[in-house]
Amino acid sequence: MAEIQRRDLMKGAAAAAVGVALTGAGGVAAAAPAGHRDPPVALTPGGQDFPKVGGNLGNQNYTALDGIRRGNVRGLGGAWVNRIEGGLAAGNSQSTAVAVDGVLYIESALGNVFAVDGATGTTKWVYRQTRGSLTRRGVAVGDGKVFTHGKGNWIIALDQQTGAVAWERQITGYGTMEKVAITYHDGQLFCGTADSDRAAGLSLDASNGELLWHFWGAPGTGEIGNDTWEGESWRTGGCTPWMHPAVDPDLGLVYWAFGNARGNRSSQDGSQRGGQNLFSSSLVAIDMRTGAYRWHFQSIHHGIWDMDNTMAPVLADVRIHGRTRKVVIYGSKCGMYYILDRETGEAPLGIDEVPVPQDARQKTWPTQPFPRQGPWTRTRPVDQPLGTAVPGDPARAVPNYRQGALYTPHWDEPVLSIPGHGGGADWAHQSFSHSTGCVYTGFGYVAAAHSLTEASNGLRPPGEYQTGGIVAVDVRTNRVRWKKNMPYSLAHGNGILTTAGDLLFIGQPDGNLLCLDARDGHELWRFQCGAAISSSPVMYEVDGVQYLAVYAGGTSIPYGDSAPRGDFLWAFRIGGRVPPAPTPAPPVIRRPVQGAPVEGSAVANTVVIGRTYDPATGTVGPTESTAVNAMAPTHLRVPAGTTVTFTNHAGNAGVRGATQFFEGLFDVRLAPGESYAHRFREKGEYFFNDPASPRSTGKIEVY
C-alpha cells in the first residue's frame, strides 16, 4: 500500500506540473516527449502474428499479409472449425482471438481460456474458469503468459505453454473489472473497469499483478478535473473506461476513452451534477509509466444521453495539409470522428464548439464539439408520413414521439434521437488501413428515447428497426469515402479487419462472415459460421500458409435472445474444404414488444389500451398505465382475416389511441370507453403505439 501511495503522489506531482486549464472542447498540455522510432512501434501492422485485440498497440486491426486478395478470395474456405466448448449454444461471447507463434488464444462465454493450434484447430490446453462468468472481450499475451479476468476483480496470469496459473491478483476499489480486453506492453498490463459509481484505468506489473498506477475517470478532490463536478457528485460520477486503450511507446503515452457520467438516478439525469463532468465522454492521454495526465479531449460535455464514445482509440500517421501528423482517431456513438494530434490533443482538421438546445433543469452545457467536416451518419430521425416510406428505412422514426437532433435535452417526456446510445459506432472495433488511408467502422441505427421516466440509459422503442452499416472515412480529410447500409446493426463487437490486399472482413449477427472490397464496399465473399459474430476477424500465418480466423459465439446486444449463439472458432485458408455451418434462424431486427404472445381467442380478439395484462390470470390491470407494456395484451396472435378491437378502457382518464406503423393501416384517438375495429387480412407483424403515450406499444401477429 505504501508503494501504491508513493506512486499516486508521483502521479499527482506530475499532473500538477502540467498546469493546464481544462477549457473548451479539451485541455491541451505541453507536448509529450518527442522520441520517435522508425517504424513507430504502435503502428507496426500484424503479419505472421496478430498478437493482441486490435492487432497492434494502435488498435489498427490491419494486417500486412496479402496472400488472400481480391483475385483469389472466392477460393477461401474453412480450414478447420473447433467447437471449443463442445457445442455450447448459449451465453454471451464478445471475445476476439489473438494469434501468437501459430497459436490462437480465445475466451469462451463461460470464461474458459483455450489455446488452439492455428494450423490444425486442435486444442492445446484449456484453463477452466473457477470464478463464474462475466463479459469478456479478449486476452493479452506477453512475457510468456496469457492474461485473463476472473469474476470479483481478479486478474489471472496463465503460462503461455501449458495454461497453468502463474499468478492471480484481486484488484478492488477501482470499479468492476470486466468488458475490457487486457492490453500488454513491455512488462505492463493496462486494464479498464466498468459499471461502477466511480472507476479507473489501471496499470499492473505483468510479472505479479501489482498495481503500478490508476487514473480515475471522475477525479477526486485536488485532482485535475474535479472542479468540473458540482459538489460531491464526482463520487458517483461513473466515467468508466470500459474499452481497451491504445498505447504509443514512442511518445510514452496510453490513450484511454472514459464513459458517460452518471446522475443521481441514471446516466440520463444531469440535474445534480452541474459542470462539464470530466473525464466523462473523454479521451485522455496518460503517461504510460507514471499515470500522469498529459492532455484530454471531451467529446460530449455534461452528457445526459449515454452516448459516451467509449471506443478503443485508433492511432495512425497521416498527411494532413501537407504535413505528417501523429493522430489518434476517437469516436463515436454520435456518428462523428474526432481526429486529434496524439502528441498535443489539438485538432488539425478543426473542431468547433457549437451552441445546442438548453434545459436549465438538466444543467446542460451551452455548447458541444462538432468536427467541421460533420457527421458520417444521420443524426436526426427520418420523419415521413405513415405508409409512404420504404419499410425498414434504417433511420425512420417510430411515430408519436417528440423528436430531437443530437444533444436535444429531455426531462419527463421521452425525446427520440438517432443513431442512439446503442447505435453509431458503439464498441465495434474499428480498422485503419495503411493502404487506403481510411478508418472503417461497423455502425448501428438504434434510436433511443431519453427521459427521466426511463430506467437506466433510455428506451429503445418497441417496433423500431435496428439496422446499421459500414462506413469508410478518409483520416486525412475526415470525409466519408463510402458508406454501405446493411440489414443489421454492426455496432456491438462486429469488428473490422482490413488487409494489405485491400480486403475488409466483418461478421454479422446472422452468422455470416463477409469480405468486402475496402476501396468501395463491394461484397466479394461470405461464409456462414453458425452463430452470431460479436468479435473481430484476425489474420495470421503458420508455415507459410496464411489464415483468417473468427470466433462466432453471439451476444444479446442489440437483438436479445433472437441472436443465434454458439462456440465456433473458425479458421479459413485458400483451398479450405470445411463446409459452412447450418444457417441459424436470423435475428429479429425490429425491437420486440414486452410480453409473450397471447392467442386472440383468449381475449375475444381485443386489445385494451392503457392497461397492463397478467398472462397468469388472463386479467386486465386495475389501474391506468403509460408504461411500455400498457397494452392488454402487448402481443396478440390471430389468424388472417380476424377483426381486432382496440378499446380505450372506460376507467382511463382521457383520450388514448392506436397508431399502426409503419404500414399506416390506422391512426385513431378514442375517448374513455370508445373502441375501434380493424380487420387484418394479410399475414405479418403489425406494430402500434398510443399517440397519448408512445412508449405503450403493442403488436398484432397475423398468421
Image (cartoon, helix red, strand yellow):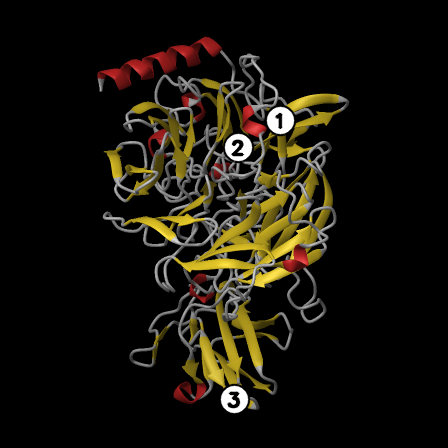
**Which of 545 and 423 lies nearest the eye of the viewer?**
545
Residue 110: percent from left, percent from top: 32, 54
Q: Quadrant of the N terminus?
A: top left
**Which of 444 and 355 lies nearest the eye of the viewer?**
444
- Real-space Cα separation, disc 1 to disc 3, in angstroms: 59 Å
Q: Residue at x 38, y 10 (%)?
A: 13
Residue 471: percent from left, percent from top: 66, 47
Q: Is residue 676 above or below residue 516?
A: below
Under circle 3, the secondary element is: loop
Residue 436: percent from left, percent from top: 71, 39
Quadrant of the image occupied by residue 157 = top left
User: Mark 1 or mark 2, which has the lower sequence index?
Assistant: 2
Residue 593 seen in this snapshot:
yes
User: Mark 2 or mark 3, which has the lower sequence index?
Assistant: 2
User: For the residue carrying disc 1, how many other residues have a C-alpha within 10 Å: few (<14), some (14-19), or many (20+)?
Assistant: many
Q: Is residue 404 above or below residue 593?
A: above
Dot 2 amino acid type: His
- For residue 639, which numbered disc appears in the image? 3
Q: Is residue 127 above or below residue 557?
A: above
Residue 272 seen in this snapshot:
no
Q: Are marks 2 and 3 in contact (CB under 8 Å)?
A: no
Q: Residue at x 26, y 16 (%)?
A: 3
**Which of 26 and 427 lies nearest the eye of the viewer?**
427
- For residue 452, which numbered disc appears in the image? none
Dot 1 amino acid type: Val
Under circle 1, the secondary element is: strand
Left or right for 61, reference 521 = left
Quadrant of the image occupied by residue 177 = top left
Residue 650: percent from left, percent from top: 43, 78
- Real-space Cα separation, disc 2 to disc 3, in angstroms: 51 Å
Q: Which residue is mark 1?
A: 327
Q: Which residue is mark 2?
A: 301
